Image (cartoon, grey):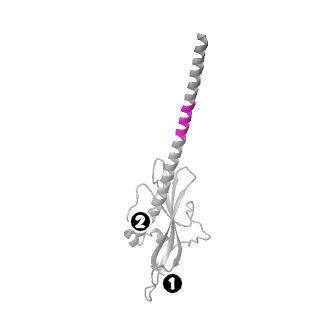
């Protein structure tokens, strides 16, 4: 009678040990899944920050009085105005197209007054994140909310689209965001 009791306790102990082991494996598996999801969210946030910073870099450079007053430098909007016209109905402002549109890149060293943002390098390290922009001229049109008074010199709104892009090196996905910019400028008809 005593031997059967000891065997039952051993079987019960083995079943309990198996249950604890299964719970431990499930907890580790859940923890690994949560870590992967957290890393993915963090990476997505970094690429979105890179895309937003690239857009801010275009705005910064386009407002930089040193760049604007230097005849040897073009800010991205001026360069885009002299380039191809972007038609939103037929064209795409893709992050991977670096031949048709005006390109700028932002690195971890940030923005510097008086310089075009064309340096190469990473926006962020660990993981390595690249940040760049594409700028294109869309159209020239009357500015909403402004009056075109006779003798005003023919001011018009020059409309641009800026696409900021961010990518983790080695990954296929690119995070992008766009900004439409309208700038007062002389009418091309008045020139």
Residue, disc 1? 189
- The boundaries of the magenta stretch are 22-32
Left or right of 61? Residue 22 is: right
Residue 117 horizontal/vertical position (percent): 44, 62
Circle 2/circle 1 CB separation < 8 Å:
no
- Give the crowd class for mark 2: few <14, some 14-19, many >=20 residues within 10 Å: some
Q: Earlier in the sequence, mark 2 or mark 1?
A: 2
Assign the N terminus to one quadrant of the image. top right
Q: CA distance from mark 2 to mark 1?
A: 28 Å
**Whether residue 98 is situated above or below residue 36 in the rendered picture:** below
Residue 53: give x, y in percent of width and height: 45, 59
- Depth check: give the residue in front, 156 or 120: 156
Residue at 59%, 66% in the rendered image? 92
Which residue is depicted at the point 52% across and 51% down? 169
Label 1: how many Cα within 10 Å (few below 14, some 14–19, many 20+)? few
Q: Is residue 149 magenta?
A: no
The residue that appears at 58% across and 26% down in the rendered structure is 18
Give the residue at x 50% y 54%. Answer: 47
Give the secondary structure at mark 1: loop
Q: What is the number of the mark on residue 84?
A: none
In the picture, residue 150 is in which quadrant?
Answer: bottom left
Count of picture labels: 2
Q: Is residue 13 above or below residue 127?
A: above
90 and 146: which is toward the camera: 146
Q: Quadrant of residue 73?
A: bottom left
The x, y position of residue 54, in whole percent, is: 47, 61
Q: Is residue 108 left or right of residue 26?
A: left
Image quadrant in which you'd find residue 72: bottom left
**Residue hosting label 2:** 60
Q: Does the magenta run of residues contain 30?
A: yes
Which percent across, then down, holds residue 59?
44, 66
Considering depth in this image, is 117 or 32 the residue closer to the camera?
32
């Amino acid at each position: 009678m005593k031997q059967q009791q000891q065997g039952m306790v051993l079987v019960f102990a083995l079943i309990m040990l198996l249950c604890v082991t299964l719970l431990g494996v499930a907890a580790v598996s859940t923890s690994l899944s949560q870590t992967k999801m957290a890393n993915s969210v963090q990476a997505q946030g970094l690429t979105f920050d890179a895309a937003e910073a690239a857009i801010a870099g275009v705005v910064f450079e386009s407002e930089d009085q040193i760049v604007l007053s230097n005849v040897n430098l073009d800010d991205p909007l001026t360069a885009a105005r002299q380039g191809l016209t972007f038609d939103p109905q037929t064209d795409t402002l893709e992050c991977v197209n670096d031949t048709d549109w005006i390109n700028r890149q932002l690195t971890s060293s940030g923005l510097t007054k008086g310089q075009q943002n064309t340096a190469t390098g990473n926006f962020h390290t660990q993981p390595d994140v690249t940040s760049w922009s594409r700028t294109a001229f869309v159209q020239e049109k009357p500015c909403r909310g402004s009056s075109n008074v006779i003798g005003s010199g023919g001011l018009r709104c020059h409309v641009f689209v800026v696409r900021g892009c961010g990518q983790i090196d080695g990954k296929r996905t690119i995070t992008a965001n766009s900004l439409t910019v309208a700038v007062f400028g002389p009418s091309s008809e008045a020139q």
